[in-house]
Amino acid sequence: MNGRPSAVQRTSSIASRLSNPELGTSALDDDDASAAHAALEIDEIKRYEDFTTIDWVQDAARASLRRKARRAENAGFLELRGGRGLGLRRTLAEAYNAGQAWIVVSLVGAAIGLNAGFLNIVTEWLSDVKLGYCTTAFYLNENFCCWGAESGCNEWKSWSGWWPVNYVLYIGFSTVFAFSAARLVKSFAPYAAGSGISEIKCIIAGFVMKGFLGSWTLLIKSIGLPLAIASGLSVGKEGPSVHYAVCTGNVISRLFNKYKRNAAKTREILSASAAAGVAVAFGSPIGGVLFSLEEMSNYFPLKTMWRSYFCALVATAVLAAMNPFRTGQLVMFQVKYDRTWHFFEIIFYIVIGIFGGLYGALVIKWNLRVQAFRKKYLSQYAILEATLLAALTAVICYPNMFLRIDMTESMEILFMECEGDHDYDELCEEKHRWAMIFSLGAATIIRTFLVIISYGCKVPAGIFVPSMAIGASFGRMVGIFVQTLHESFPKAALFSACPLDGPCITPGTYAFLGAAAALSGIMHITVSVVVIMFELTGALTYILPTMIVVGVTKAVSDRFGKGGIADRMIWFNGFPFLDNKEDHTFNVPASHVMQIKLTVLPANTLELRDVEKLLQESRYQGFPIVEDRASMTLIGYIGRTELRYALDRAKKDQLVSPAAKCYFTPPPPHATNSSRSRQHSRTDNLTSDDTPSGSTTFATMASSLAPLDFSRFIDETPLAVHPHLPLETVMELFKKMGPRVILIEHRGKLTGLVTVKDCLKYQFKVEAQEREGEGALEGEGGEKLWGVMKNVGLWVRESLGGLGERFGGMGVGRLRLPHRHRCLPQPRSSFLLISSDLLVQGARGPRRVHVCAESLESGNLGGVDSRHPSQCHPPCPRSSRERQIQCQYHLQPRLHLQCAFPRPARSRRVRLLLPLPLRLLPPHLLR
């Protein structure tokens, strides 16, 4: 062991130095002061790189040094001033520092509530404007326009009295809304697409995704979400509500220094913001806290729970004060039930629970396959895909009364009891029950299909409300069927508990339970769903049925696979996330997955040039420190940021030679003494006359060769385990403590290291057979589907080209470059023109045009500068009859040009300019 202290001894020695009360807060020794100062400086420049993980162990250590340095600074300042007149100021400063967290969560909660209220109002108006307009005020939605109307509403008008016109306008509005949302996302904030729950789970766990929680993402998410919902796509706003809430928490917390440099503190705010996002989405503050605990956070101490509760409370209170629906309800589908349930209904509750589990398994499986198909084939056509999906959804959904309206509004109708004068479009009429059953069944099937193909497109999109709408339609269908069965056989033994002179079955409660089942099935959450549904209804009597339905759903869902759609999306995207809800049994030691080929730093044999070269050639986030490469005796660990800071600081403080020795342990006395003796001996032999002004002296050379001490920047107590430690225990260390790397040490000798990605790679390898084929439309099926889609797209484009040729004189065609007429540009050329006879596939069949090629020193896209013609053959004849065309090019999978040109004759010379150096492309791209 070479006298190396154990990890426990080293940890206890450091802890005693940091927390010895006899020293007092102002009695820092030189080593501790320098270490604290270095930690504070590193914090100023510390920026975790994108797509890396946070080392929670090191983050906690730096936080401890920051607190100690702050206490020492305050104590020294008070001692300097004698403590006179600073009592009140110090008390106020300490009170502000202690209450800063509550100030932040209050501001975050208020901002989330305001944003949620604004989005509710805008979403309702955009959803209603597809069907008609208010004659009294165009900015009012249908509910506000018809406020107080008892029978009929003359103020709200459809766009036309002829239903085909309304149908076309409905499709047009949906398409425009979807196009606008997709364009905003692609142009300004690509991270605003999707739900965001999967990524937020990873970010809270320590995964760094720069820009995902930024201000631009918050802005585009808030603008694009109402557009995406109003487009009619089978997506919801509850999942994106969590995303924009967490963005709000991140943006506001960055305004405070306490959270700007402390990842652990920021994690508390993000967890609280997620709870507030669910709270305003469902009007359920307690359910939001439980959702953050059950689904979002892998580390949720009591302090974080209290702050999440307070943030959700403030957000819900602000939303209630805004009262966006003017009904006192926080969400549109909030209902109250005053009837009880009967024990014979448990049979049908179990059926609903089974449906929820099957629905979740079906949607998760096929949506992952659609996501893989989208990622492989449709990544370049995000805007077109969202637009076509919205148009397809509008075409399919308009004929069905339950699919035509907004999903939250449909849930409001399906949750209601049948009483009073409201029949909700014949939903409660006895003569239309079988028609309603078939309509609800069709809505369930169609909506499920649309959710599978829509969730994941590049617009702000969630899956909570679509799933709840599907479950509500199925549950209402079951409820109407049970009600019809009871009225057909009122004296059956099954219905003996029903009263003879009153209603027995409440179909709305079945819709309510179906929504809970579908939500639980798609997300694999239980307790938070029960609490959310309880807060939506306020009915204590339906807690037990909800628990039964959710329990059955959970059992069925687990039969088909672990984890909800958010967990499966994490697996699909390959994020380094270890779920603490999963238990694994691998029966292998840590040495089975560790990395053996390591990049290590010897403690005292490296020169400065060697360290700089290592930083340039490797991208690792840290390096183990060993005594020497032969013995591999572990000394400690140094992060990349700390090492870079140490090098920059050494160059800043003194003139350093590239041959200077770097010591990662305290340098031996003889190294320092010999350097000083060389310096003194050489300076004594020199006089001022011998040294010309401005030259390099021996003293300067000696100081440049002085050893560099980096020992105070290394971690002497890295987390190290035995090679035979079970892999399950190593994974628990990653989950509970959150280190970036765990070193493998055997009898003081470094044998390897393990990261989260190493554990996940082995986990994926083990689970490959269980999930074989999942997440991809593989083989001939995907290729055939893509071939059909391409052929349809070409047919549509050629049809549109024919219309353009007839009405506008412009055509759209394809140019394919032949291999034999490849022309390389000049060495300094920035643009290239290809000269060849090309076949143009236009609107009226194939046409042959001549494309002239020139290599230019300068020029702009769409304009040709012929002052510098190249030696390409055949040369392009300069003719006034030549026309210029503008083209767009794609390099996947081959060079493909999309050109718009004037209506061609049988033979027409056109000029084509490509703004890229084709000499860098392999020849097969030019075919």
Image (cartoon, rainbow, N blue to C red):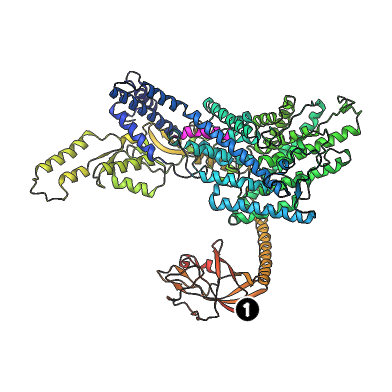
What secondary structure is found at the residue carrying circle 1? Answer: loop
- x and y, in percent, of residue 232 in the image: 69, 48
Left/right placement of residue 514 relative to residue 222 reads right
Can residue 219 be seen by looking at this rendering?
yes
The kind of residue tagged 1 is Ala
- x and y, in percent, of residue 48 in the image: 44, 41
In this view, the residue in front, 818 or 75, is 75
Quarter-of-image position of residue 561: top right
| Disc 1 packing (10 Å; few <14; some 14–19; many ≥20) | few
Residue 304 magenta-highlighted: no
Quarter-of-image position of residue 844: bottom right
In this view, the residue in front, 659 or 115, is 115
The residue that disc 1 covers is: 905
Residue 271 magenta-highlighted: yes
- x and y, in percent, of residue 145 in the image: 72, 43
Residue stretch rendered in magenta on the structure: 262-275
Left/right placement of residue 321 relative to residue 3 reads right
What residue do we see at 50% from left, 28% from top?
102
Dominant secondary structure (helix, strand or loop) of the stretch shown in magenta? helix
In this view, the residue in front, 706 or 255, is 255
What residue do we see at 60% from left, 47% from top?
224
Can residue 451 be seen by looking at this rendering?
no
For the N terminus, the image quarter is: top left
Residue 158, placed above or below residue 92: below
